[in-house]
Amino acid sequence: MIIITGGAGFIGSAMLWELNCMGEDDVIIVDNPGSTTTEKWRNLSSLQFADIIPIELFPDMLDRGAFKGISAIFHMGANSSTTETDADHLLANNFGYSKKIASFCMARNVRLIYASSAATYGDGSNGYSDDINGLGTLRPLNMYGYSKHLFDQWALRNKVLNHAAGLKFFNVYGPNEYHKQDMSSVVFKAYHQIREMGFVKLFKSHRPDYEDGEQLRDFVYISDCTRIMAWLVENPVAGLFNVGSGTPRSFKDLANATFSALGQKPVINYIPMPETLRDKYQYYTCADITKLRMAGYTKQFTSIEDGIQEYVRHYLSSETPHFECHK
């Protein structure tokens, strides 16, 4: 049996799809599928799983031994909003909840693969190395990043990272992110802006060393992420690992790729960045994936041109935009 917390969410449901395509459906989903506004439940509607457990009931069920024969837990559940200001909520939901799951896995020798975040790196001034010896130098820019950083530090101190794999996801995009609203990827937003208005809005640069639209991100396609997670089940290496392509690309490149996938000429409007974001904005991110490669992961990553073309043509432009497994 495999458990996925946040299993109705973006990365969680994509991992369920990956497992289904591998022939695995003995999976427990831990999530609250959401209101009719977000319709997060649709991420699960074409996938197979054994049961679904509400988030608030799961820790007590673990304590009571309600689940037998657990081989792995993918802990993807969290409040992932980078603009969330309720620190107490983030500490309880992202830090406290994670400690309970990690403690269970340690006590019972259950494989744990959990979601950290590239937001832990802050402005990137201390680099993007996933070497655990550099954890103490990181300074996240928002409370979300700090909540993830706190758990990484706790996991290191308590030797969880001797057995578990923590994944620092960079800018993930792809199918099943539709419920994320403001936190959805720039690809998803660009697609709808093009369809509705004929142009894409990008932030102007407020730094002289970056041209408008030339801010750089490490964009990684969701299926690359799930392949890494599946590999980590079969290859129980431990520690923190960056999950990104290792190649930074500009927002302008991303917008152009989206126009190309739609067969249209690029039209980009640059708008001022809100002042509330300017001192918290990352102009450059790039995953150092040396450690992942040294651990033995050899598969190539999807370029944004290929990833966006698949996402736009086979999902966003489809009447069935969610992941389905066709065996």
Image (cartoon, rainbow, N blue to C red):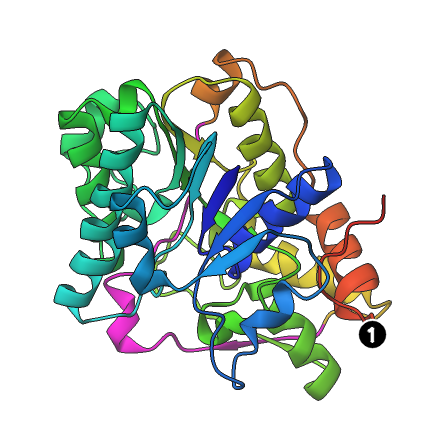
Q: Amino acid at mark 1?
A: Glu
Q: Name the residue at 35% across, 66% down.
A: 81
**Position of 280 relative to 168 (above/below):** below
Q: Name the residue at 26% across, 70% down.
A: 84
Q: Name the residue at 61% across, 48% down.
A: 16
The magenta stretch spans residue 155: no
Residue 203 as seen in the image, left or right of residue 46: left
Depth check, front residue: 269 or 103: 103
* Magenta stretch, overall SS: loop
User: What's drawn in magenta, residue-wise?
Assistant: 267-288
Residue 56 as seen in the image, left or right of residue 326: left
Residue density around tag 1, few if under 14, some if 14–19, many if 20 or more, within 10 Å: few
Residue 135 as seen in the image, left or right of residue 216: left
**Position of 315 relative to 68 (above/below):** below
Mark 1 residue element: loop
**Can see residue 79?**
no
Depth check, front residue: 195 or 103: 103
Residue 98 placed where, x, y %? 26, 46
In which quarter of the view is residue 265 placed? bottom right
Residue 160 placed where, x, y %? 25, 26
The quarter of the rendered structure image containing the C terminus is top right
In which quarter of the view is residue 100 placed? top left
Depth check, front residue: 318 or 9: 9
**Position of 89 relative to 116 (above/below):** below
Q: Which residue is mark 1?
A: 319
**Can see residue 212?**
yes
In which quarter of the view is residue 269 placed? bottom right
Residue 115 placed where, x, y %? 39, 43
Q: How many marks?
A: 1
